Image: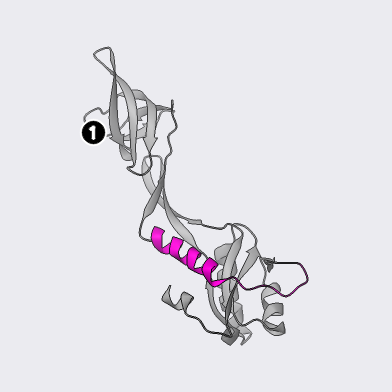
Amino acid sequence: MEKALNNNDSFNWFSLRVISGKERVVEDTILYESKRENIEDAIEEVFVPFEKVVKIINSKKVIKERVFFPGYILIKMRLDKVSRYFIENIQGVISFVGAKGKQPIPLRDAEIKKIFGEVERKEGREMIVSPFQKDDSVKIIAGPFVDFSGMVKETNDEKQKVKVTISIFGRSTPVELDYFQVELER
């Protein structure tokens, strides 16, 4: 990240529109092709901002990467006719962000600092996406209430907890459980 914010006057950050879902592939292609075409000295860095997201699938914790800006990547490069032509002809690149047919406009330092600040803030933190919604029917699979069934009343993604109402001795009782202690009933 420190390298990203260093100011080298001849290099600027630009935003590229790319095929959504292919950001990593385009990043790898740019880096590979720039070496192959001997133009890597014009490209300092290619960056795909992402965060780690934890999803619970079949009671298993699955970590996935989610791109901050689907369909866009950032590139720090020295822009000239050759490097622009090279980038615009990479498979998966749609165009530079900006007015069509005109010279691409570099991103402002404030924009870059904001993007990298957001990435650093979320780095190391895994965001859990709740597989549960209010009024979902769930079965408890771990803890003291194993095999009980109940209804989701609320979820807390930050704490990774879910409040479930279960019936104990004929009375409706709310219990707070970890996401990993419950699964959706089929």
Query: Is residue 53 depicted above or below 4 in this figure?
Result: above
Quadrant in which residue 148 is drawn:
top left
Three-letter code for the amino acid on which mark 1 is drawn:
Gly
Residue closer to the observer: 115 or 75: 115
Residue plotted at (35% across, 28% down): 139
Name the image colouring.
one colour
Q: Quadrant of the C terminus?
A: top left
Disc 1 designates what residue? 143
Residue 141: image x %, image y %? 30, 33
Residue closer to the observer: 76 or 59: 76
Residue 130: image x %, image y %? 42, 40
Residue plotted at (57% across, 82% down): 11
72 to the left or right of 133: right
Q: Looking at this rendering, what residue extends furthest in the top direction?
A: 170
Based on the picture, tell me whether residue 106 belongs to the magenta stretch: yes
Residue plotted at (58% across, 66% down): 73
Based on the picture, tell me whether residue 79 belongs to the magenta stretch: no
Q: Looking at this rendering, what residue extends furthest in the left direction?
A: 144
The answer to whether any part of residue 147 appears in the image is no
Q: Residues within 10 Å of mark 1 (few under 14, many from 20)?
A: few
Quadrant in which residue 91 is drawn:
bottom right
Q: Looking at this rendering, what residue extends furthest in the front direction?
A: 110
Query: Is residue 36 depicted above or below 5 in this figure?
Result: below
Residue closer to the observer: 155 or 169: 155
154 to the left or right of 102: left
Circle 1 sits in a helix, a strand or a loop, which is it? loop
Q: Looking at this rendering, what residue extends furthest in the right direction?
A: 101
Residue 83: image x %, image y %? 67, 81
83 to the left or right of 155: right
Magenta stretch: give its range.
100-122
